[in-house]
Every structure is written in C-alpha cells, then in structure tokens.
Image (tube, grey):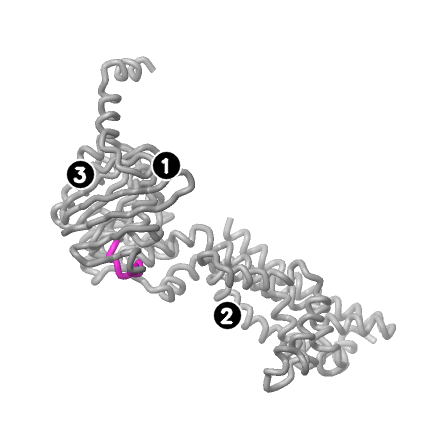
Amino acid sequence: MGLVVSVRKQLKHFNIRMSFVCGGGELAAVVGPSGAGKTTLVRMLAGLEPPDGGTISLNGRIWTDTAANYNIPIQERGVSLVFQEFTLFPHMNVRRNVAFAARSMELAEKYMDMFGVLRLADRKPDAISGGERQRVAFCQALAREPEVLLLDEPFSALDVATRRNLRDHLKELKRELAVPILHVTHDLEEAAFLGDIILAMENGCAAPGWFDRQVRFFTHPSTSAMQAAM
Amino acid sequence: MGVLGILSRPETSGPLWLTLRVLAVSGTLHLAAGLLLGYYLTGRKTGVRSVVDFLVSLPLVFPPIATGFVLLLLLGRNGVLGRLLPTGIVFSFSGVVLASFVAGLPLMVKPVEAALRGNARQLGEVSRMLGKSEWQTFWLVLLPNVRRSVASGWFLALGRSLGEVGITLMLGGNIIGKTNTLSLEIYNAVFSGEFDRAMVLSGIIGVFSLILFLMVRRLSAVEE
C-alpha cells in the first residue's frame, strides 16, 4: 500500500527508470545531481508528464498503467505539488489563494494560522516576502487535503532561517498528514533530517550508493580542510 | 465644403457606420475566437494544431489581396465551402465582417498564445493539480493573468480590421452603399478626385488608430 511507483521515460540523454514504494506518513527524500531526472519523476507522479511505460498506484488505486493505456486526469489524483519557484495566483490575495482548493474556509485559515500567514490574508503575493509566499504555497497545497504531497525543491530559494523553520514545520506535519510525501532536495542534511527513505537518482536511475558517497565526501577530513581553507 | 459638411454627406457617414458595425461584430468574434484559439494552440503539438496555427498566422505573411482571392474561391457561390452555406457570404455585410475577422485574428491570437505559454502555464498546472477543471482553470486562473495581453491583442486586431482593404475588396466587392468600408471609401474618394473627402476619411481613421495606439501603449506601461 501507499504510493507504488515503477516508471520509465526516455529523456534526451538518458532514460528514467525508477521503482519505489512510499507509505502513508513517510517522506521519501529524492536526491541526486542536477539533471538526474528528479523533477521529471515528480511531474510524472503529478500527471503533468506521461511516463513511456510502467504503473503508478496509490493505496491500490491505479493512477497510471501504460500497458492498459490508462491514465487518470491530474484533477483526480489528489496530488499537491509545491514548486521551487513561487506559483501563487498573482491576481488573488493570500486568503483566496489558500482557499482556492480548500473544502472549507476554516481549513484554509487553520493552515494560514499554522504557517503564520493569517495576518497577510488580504495581501497579494507580490506584496509579501519570498519566504512568506512559500509558506502560503504550503498552506495552499495542504488545504487541498492531498493524498500525496510532492515538493520540488520548495526551500531552495529561501534564506537559511526560513528554510530551517519550514523544514521543522514539515517534520511535524509529516505524521499528522499520514500521506506519502516526495521531497526533492539538493540539501543532503535536509534529506537526512526529513527523509524516512532516501531515493538517490543519477542519470534517471536509482543510485543507492550516491547519498553515502556524497555524505562521506562532505565529511571527509580533507574536504573539510579544503572548505575551511577557501 | 467644411469638415462637418463632408461628414454629414451619406457617402461619408454610410461607410463610417458600416465600419463601426463591422468592428462591433468582428471585435466580438476576435475576443471569443482569439481566446479559444490562443488557449488551444498552447496544447501539446499535433498535426491538427500545426495546421490551425498555420491558418491563423497566414494573414500575417500572405498578401491580403491573395488571401481574399483564396477566400473568394472557397466561399463564392460555386466554391467548395460556399456551396454548403445556406446564404451567400461574399459581396455582403457578412463578407466584410469575415474579411475584418480574418485580417485581425493573428494579432489577437498570437499575444494571447504567448502570454499563456509564459508564467500562466505553470499557474495552470497548479490549478489543475488543485482539482480545477480545464474550464475553471481557464476562467479563474489563466484569463485574469493574461487579461492585459488579451486587451492589447484585441486593440491591435481592431486597428488591423479598421485599415483592412485587400481581403475586404475581394470578399465585400466595394459595393457603394453596401460594402464600402471607411478604408475602401478613401480609395473611392481619391479615385473620383474628392481629395477633401479622402482627407476627412483618413482623419477619422487616424483618430481611431491614435486611440487604439494609446490604449496599447498604456497597457504595455502597466505591464512593465
């Protein structure tokens, strides 16, 4: 049960071939070098790009089965995706953005309160800071009550303090939400802190040793000495 | 004869009212078709989409008189499409509206398409993921975010329709009192040596064009 994925897709320079399971309440941290196919994997799960082959299912319900030519529409997947860039609707204020897909205004306001943006409710996205916009994006994604939460480097454009704060929030929310969460990140510390599962990708495929190699590289005495000397 | 005298003459006021009626109808059609086609063309590339894109863009690069001739062949009483129509289009008000519509369409569709392909595309993805249908996404998210491009495109299309001659000549026939729009009437006035009247007609078009230009410029400034 949970999110069961086995997909392949031909990209320009390599094929994506990934299989994994992510249970409810688990967070799979997707790590790997730039251009490894992480974002494409997330977009396939969201239904924004079709895989060339394979299946995707959630709790036994098939979302995609290329052999049966079956692919449920994006709207029916119950997926929320928080992008790297700020993607709030610029013509709506914060309240309308969060309530856009919420079952009730109470739910929208609950998340706005939780993420400390309730006081900004009447402001438009261009009148709040980058960190605040990303908090609102989280509220919007959660107010939909997603069955799967996808996060595509949502903290990468934020300062360290905001990033830490949001990271802590996510850690707390993880169990409460009890849905599979896929979190694409370049920050290995963040991946280790949040991830129940580490999905390392290299050239579109699982690279089980990649994470350990990177961690060893960054913690190796000579690397630390080099970084200190710079 | 003064400007007011020239304006009050039926051979001047007639084309003016005809042009306003044509602009009212073709402008409405531009809005509806421009939005739908602009949205349609942002979809995944297919053979049908490429053909639609080609046909919409054609009046930008193909000479208007030749475009009008092709349409005349297709829509004439014995044309491939004309035979299927219950009433004749050519040499009538409908023909003039069609000419105006075809000429202005690419100037409406292309800015809308470009705007929808930009940031609006990702906003559309977010909306669909948040459970909204294609139509809800279009009306609630995409349209409000490209409204300035829609307005700019619409004013440009109106301007192009206002000055349209070649296609109108072929499809409308420049029938005095029936299909002679302002632009065609300038030609008629010059041809019959009425330079004063041609000047007044040109002045009317000039004022319209200036207003449209100022509207487009204002929209561009707001966008910046």
Q: Residue furthest left?
A: A175
- The residue that disc 3 covers is A197
Q: Residues within 10 Å of mark 3 (few under 14, many from 20)?
A: some
Q: CA distance from mark 3 to mark 2?
A: 50 Å
The span picked out in magenta is: A70-79
Give the number of the disc on residue B32: 2
Q: Nearer the viewer, residue A48 or A112?
A: A48
Q: CA distance from mark 1 to mark 2?
A: 41 Å
Q: Secondary structure at mark 1?
A: loop
Q: Residue A230's image quarter?
A: top left
- The residue that disc 1 covers is A35
Q: Residue furthest right?
A: B193
Q: Is residue A73 magenta?
A: yes
Query: Label 1 is placed on what type of residue?
Result: Gly
The subunit letter for the residue under badge 3 reads A
Residue A89 percent coordinates (x, y): 36, 54
